[in-house]
Image: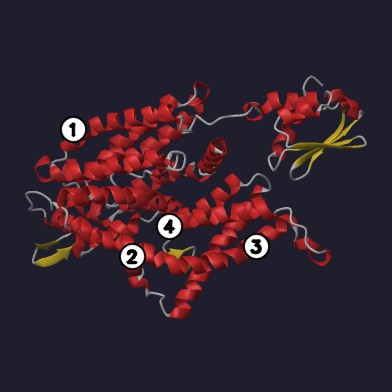
């Protein structure tokens, strides 16, 4: 029972690696482009206001932003493809369709009930534009739910047989159909339950404001828990943009919200130290993003299996660099969130502590949208230590690096967590390229026994001179899910990756000819 659970958990976690792989590059583009094309940054540093420079930064920002703006649908498709055991393309297409139908259903209900908010009020009521559809902001959570639902439907119905007059719609073709109808029901359910979830998130603000340093810890903890699911915007935006984050008179005007106050002070110029709300609701991010998670990446690299270290180095390094420079942490967090949820809770608690320490030591470094090195330099170092107390960030950050490193290293080893590079591989998965191709040929009785080789969607179709030389056991060791013989024809079932396998076998057959 326990083994089966961990096997499923590992498959679930691995299904996230496909969408995760695109995030570091997108994060660098968005982080660098967004930071240097931001109006507040340009106003503070006029030398950046060059048309050719801004053209580059705006393009970079747009290229990265489109990925993060559509993260939910990317995860819907990625989870469905990653979990499906066969016919993965159909699962991905069905998930995409399901996500569209779910949000279109929510949009229709909002319209019918008169609850569709005007554009300027969407953020206040938890609505947003998703692939051109105004819907509830369910974030990555909504995408993951669609992906899981699609996988379940695909696993259950991808071999369904319908009456003869409906036979064309049987099997794989049935999956997009049943997913679309199921997504209507899912959209209705989310319309009913999601506003209550949003309301709970909104209501936490009052508790945080009233509880001092402990409230700051709670703020950071909740913010980190909500982050990977894309729900953190609902939580922190009121602190950054409304009176919940503080009120101050600047230049004869009343300014509300931590971020607005910080940039108003930045424009004013004559300030001894920036608003303390900046320490409560912003500055703690730098400690975690520039130091803590870098230690986590190093720990995961050191705990990877020796034969996998080279393979995971590129991903972990780019994810760490993205976090350090831009403050975008999803590539790192998704790599262990579902494989080690308890470890993620510890990470969220550490992040809360980082916010609390920033509050205690009055570190008042503002930010455009995240807490990486770029914002640290622009709105911390270059503003002077007297105004921001930025020197405390590395003072706290270095111990934070080691805190994360040793925590992650201990937990991974103690509980054998399947973080990147520690996945169990069966014999077939360990075979690659030529080695697997030669093993397949050996199972087919050698290339001298192969008359003709082709493939369909999921299986090798082989004509042989003699089926007596076929070894099903050897073929199954190469990852085959089944072997079917009929006359001199052999079908070796692998799944949708069979095209690549066929090419490998053809190359092996051509050697020394």
Task: Tell me which numbered mark, 4 or 1, is placed earlier along the sequence.
Answer: 4
Q: Position of residue 299 (x, y in %)?
A: 38, 28
Whole-number angstrom distance, CA of label 4 to CA of label 2: 15 Å
Task: Tell me which numbered mark, 4 or 2, is placed earlier along the sequence.
Answer: 4
Residue at the top extreme?
A: 512
Inspect this view and state whether residue 127 appears.
no
Q: Which residue is mark 1?
A: 395
Task: Tell me which numbered mark, 1 or 3, is placed earlier along the sequence.
Answer: 3
Whole-number angstrom distance, CA of label 4 to CA of label 1: 35 Å
Q: Which residue is mark 2?
A: 199
Whole-number angstrom distance, CA of label 2 to CA of label 3: 32 Å
Whole-number angstrom distance, CA of label 1 to CA of label 3: 56 Å
Q: Judge whether 106 appears above or below 57 on screen.
A: below
Q: Position of residue 52 (x, y in %)?
A: 35, 51
Q: Which of the 4 image quarters holds residue 192?
A: bottom left
Q: Are marks 2 and 3 in contact (CB under 8 Å)?
A: no
Q: Which residue is mark 3?
A: 178
Q: Are marks 4 and 3 in contact (CB under 8 Å)?
A: no
Q: Which residue is mark 4?
A: 139
Inspect this view and state whether residue 198 appears.
yes
Tell me what residue is drawn at x 79 percent, y 26 percent: 443
Whole-number angstrom distance, CA of label 4 to CA of label 3: 23 Å
């Amino acid at each position: 029972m326990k083994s089966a659970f961990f096997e499923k958990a590992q498959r679930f976690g691995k299904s996230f690696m496909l969408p995760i792989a695109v995030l570091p590059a997108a994060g660098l583009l968005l982080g660098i482009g967004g930071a240097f094309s931001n109006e507040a940054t340009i106003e503070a540093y006029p030398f950046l206001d060059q048309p050719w420079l801004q053209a580059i930064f705006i393009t970079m920002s747009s290229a990265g932003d489109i990925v993060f703006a559509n993260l939910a649908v990317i995860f819907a498709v990625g989870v469905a493809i990653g979990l499906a055991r066969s016919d993965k393309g159909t699962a991905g297409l069905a998930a995409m369709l399901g996500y569209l139908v779910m949000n279109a259903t929510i949009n229709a209900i909002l319209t019918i009930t008169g609850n569709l908010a005007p554009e300027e009020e969407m953020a206040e009521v938890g609505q947003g534009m998703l692939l051109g559809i105004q819907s509830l902001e369910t974030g990555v959570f909504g995408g993951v739910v669609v992906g899981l639902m699609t996988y379940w439907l695909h696993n259950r119905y991808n071999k369904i047989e319908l009456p003869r007059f409906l036979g064309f719609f049987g099997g794989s073709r049935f999956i997009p159909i049943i997913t679309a109808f199921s997504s209507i029901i899912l959209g209705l359910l989310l319309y009913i339950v999601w506003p209550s979830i949003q309301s709970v998130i909104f209501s936490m603000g009052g508790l945080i404001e009233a509880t001092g340093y402990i409230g700051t810890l709670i703020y950071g903890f909740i913010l980190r828990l909500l982050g990977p699911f894309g729900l953190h915007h609902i939580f922190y935006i009121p602190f950054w943009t409304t009176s919940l984050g503080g009120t101050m008179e600047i230049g004869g005007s009343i300014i509300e919200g931590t971020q607005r106050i910080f940039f108003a002070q930045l424009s004013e110029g004559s300030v001894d130290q920036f608003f303390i709300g900046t320490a409560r609701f912003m500055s703690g991010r730098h400690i975690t993003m520039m130091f803590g998670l870098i230690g986590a990446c190093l720990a995961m690299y050191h705990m990877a299996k020796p034969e996998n270290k080279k393979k995971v180095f590129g991903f972990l390094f780019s994810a760490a660099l993205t976090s350090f420079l831009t403050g975008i942490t999803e590539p790192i967090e998704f790599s262990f969130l579902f494989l080690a949820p308890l470890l993620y809770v510890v990470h969220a608690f550490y992040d809360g502590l980082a916010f609390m320490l920033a509050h205690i030591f009055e570190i008042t470094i503002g930010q455009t949208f995240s807490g990486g090195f770029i914002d640290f330099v622009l709105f911390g170092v270059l503003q002077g230590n007297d105004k921001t107390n930025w020197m405390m960030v590395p003072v706290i950050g270095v111990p934070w690096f080691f805190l994360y490193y040793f925590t992650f290293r201990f937990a991974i080893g103690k509980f054998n967590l399947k973080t990147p590079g520690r996945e169990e591989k069966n014999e077939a998965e360990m075979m690659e390229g030529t080695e697997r191709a030669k093993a397949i040929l050996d199972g087919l009785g050698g290339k001298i026994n192969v008359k003709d080789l082709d493939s369909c969607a999921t299986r090798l179709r082989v004509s042989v001179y003699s089926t007596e030389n076929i070894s099903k056991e050897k073929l199954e060791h190469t990852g085959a899910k089944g072997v079917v013989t009929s006359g001199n024809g052999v079908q070796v079932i692998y799944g949708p990756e069979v095209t690549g396998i066929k090419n490998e076998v053809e190359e092996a057959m051509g050697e020394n000819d």
